[in-house]
Amino acid sequence: MPDTSIPPPRIAKPLFGTVGVVGFGLMGSSFARAVRRAGAARSVIACDKSAAARRKIADLKLARAVVKSPELMGPVDLVMLATPLGEYESVFRKLSPALKKGTIVSDVGSVKAPVLGLKKLLPEPGLLVPGHPIAGTERSGPAAGFGELFTGRYCLLTPDADTDRGAVRRVGRLWRALGARVEEMSAEEHDRILSFTSHLPHAAAYALVHALRDIRGAGAEGDARYAAGGLRDFTRIAASDPVMWRDVFLANREQVLARLDEYAGVLGRLREAIDRGDGAAMERIFAETRGYRRSVERAGQAALDAPIVKGKK
Amino acid sequence: MPDTSIPPPRIAKPLFGTVGVVGFGLMGSSFARAVRRAGAARSVIACDKSAAARRKIADLKLARAVVKSPELMGPVDLVMLATPLGEYESVFRKLSPALKKGTIVSDVGSVKAPVLGLKKLLPEPGLLVPGHPIAGTERSGPAAGFGELFTGRYCLLTPDADTDRGAVRRVGRLWRALGARVEEMSAEEHDRILSFTSHLPHAAAYALVHALRDIRGAGAEGDARYAAGGLRDFTRIAASDPVMWRDVFLANREQVLARLDEYAGVLGRLREAIDRGDGAAMERIFAETRGYRRSVERAGQAALDAPIVKGKK
């Protein structure tokens, strides 16, 4: 998606000197683009373990330098971690000996409690500011990123009692400069809320599209021609990055299992209503879910990939 | 959505004289707009039992005349039925004594076998041509319609052995004039395929959004702020017309129950993979579902509400 809208006013003075972005997929590359677009840092160093990604980053001129491992980034003022969650521990171990004093470490991961659990691996644990910009598309890789991805979206920061408040403020200021709305909550609350609003929907969509393939077999490909609105949306969600989502479900396992059990219960009740021909019960449920949609729209979070523009619906 | 694209060439000679559209919601009103836009009929008569809808139709000048019951439409050459499925039988009974000889009766309903079952209520059963344009949005009512809704979408016709072939050809020509791709299949095949591509996804989305409301209670409204991509799509699907969908599930009960059982089975297997920490199994499923999305995109059915324009992705 090209950056066609009017860019935000550039920051008078960059908020950080050098920012090192580790993992340059959709999120990392969008973050880097947004930082450059806003003039929020003096320079960006890219780190990605994939040679193909590194070539793409160089081709697209998305960073001042491109390295293959985090300890090779040289001194940076902020590390933004954007790899799948399963790589965090290895990145933290490589990064730690190479960090200069005062470097803030933050991330964009979709589960937050396990990230806080890794702070002991850092030389200055108080400078770890876990974050989660709630934004994304089903595309992956450095070329899929775009600088407006975070515009109007929430970015949740989940520090704990030991986190340096100055570091939290600086990371919050940075995300606001990229157009995000910043809020703070505990890592536990984050992981519970996101299990409802993000992890369960992704699990449900993956299971549904898998069920189609499983049952229809080769016929499923042909059925795609008759994909009505519902299935189209599901297939989009179920096209999200497989490794990223594997790690999300593993990292937030307890909450996700609880949501799946609750979901199975409600599906069973809907099944019963259909089985006994209880139209009134169905209509009640469907009218209520329509009401919930209206609240999502009122919250200004209804648009899909498009950036949210205030005052437009 | 305004009709901003270049309209299709107007038909040299209208395909029908007067078309009566019964049920003037999203589908009926989109059909009427598309017919006028293409010049596919000389005039449109609107029928809707809701006084508010009739006022809206008159305000928007969507029809030459507006009546409240199908027997009041006067002689028409084609009846297009676009009410919820639960009203069909009553409409057929009112309509039958008023139909002039040779009037073709068609519909846009999402389930087809029960529609064919009603043909005995018509004076000329062979002139019933059941149809289903696979298109829609989560909006309802006459004002929600737009003339491009069917552009590039499939419209499935499900005649049986007794259906007049000339009537099938005329209805097919009409839908093609509105921009749709027309295919024929049996009502049973239609109801089975659509249970996969449309009915199950809607049931899954309704259940998921209901589960959020059910479990989070008042908190669910607040969570909407943190609605990530996945939930946003689900809430859109679960905002579809409650009465229409109640009737779809009732009319296609056996197929929908079978799909719900299969879905529950796959959800259970995904739950087990997460529970035992089986990342490889998850990654396999998620990579496969991503592949399925690509096939939907190749079939040109990936866009959401927007009309499909050939050569654009």
Image (tube, coloured by chain):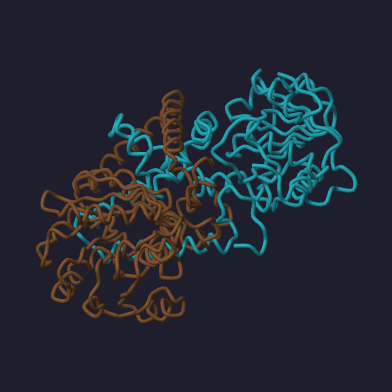
Chain colours: A cyan, B brown
Residue at 69% x, 21% y is A55
Displayed quadrant of residue B63:
bottom left
Decide if residue B1 is in sight here: no
Residue A178 against residue B296 in the figure, above or below: below
Q: Is residue B123 left or right of residue A76?
A: left
Residue B175 on image: x %, y %: 34, 55
Residue nearest the observer in this picture, B70 or B303: B70
Decide if residue B44 is in sight here: yes
Q: In the displayed image of the protein, which residue is found farthest to the front? A: B12
Residue at 76% x, 52% y is A6
Q: Is residue B216 left or right of residue A279?
A: right
Residue B96 on image: x %, y %: 15, 72
Q: How many marks?
A: 0
Residue nearest the observer in this picture, A141 or B114: B114
Residue A159 on image: x %, y %: 69, 43
Residue at 54% x, 56% y is B5
Residue at 40% x, 43% y is A260
Residue A130 against residue B110 in the figure, above or below: above
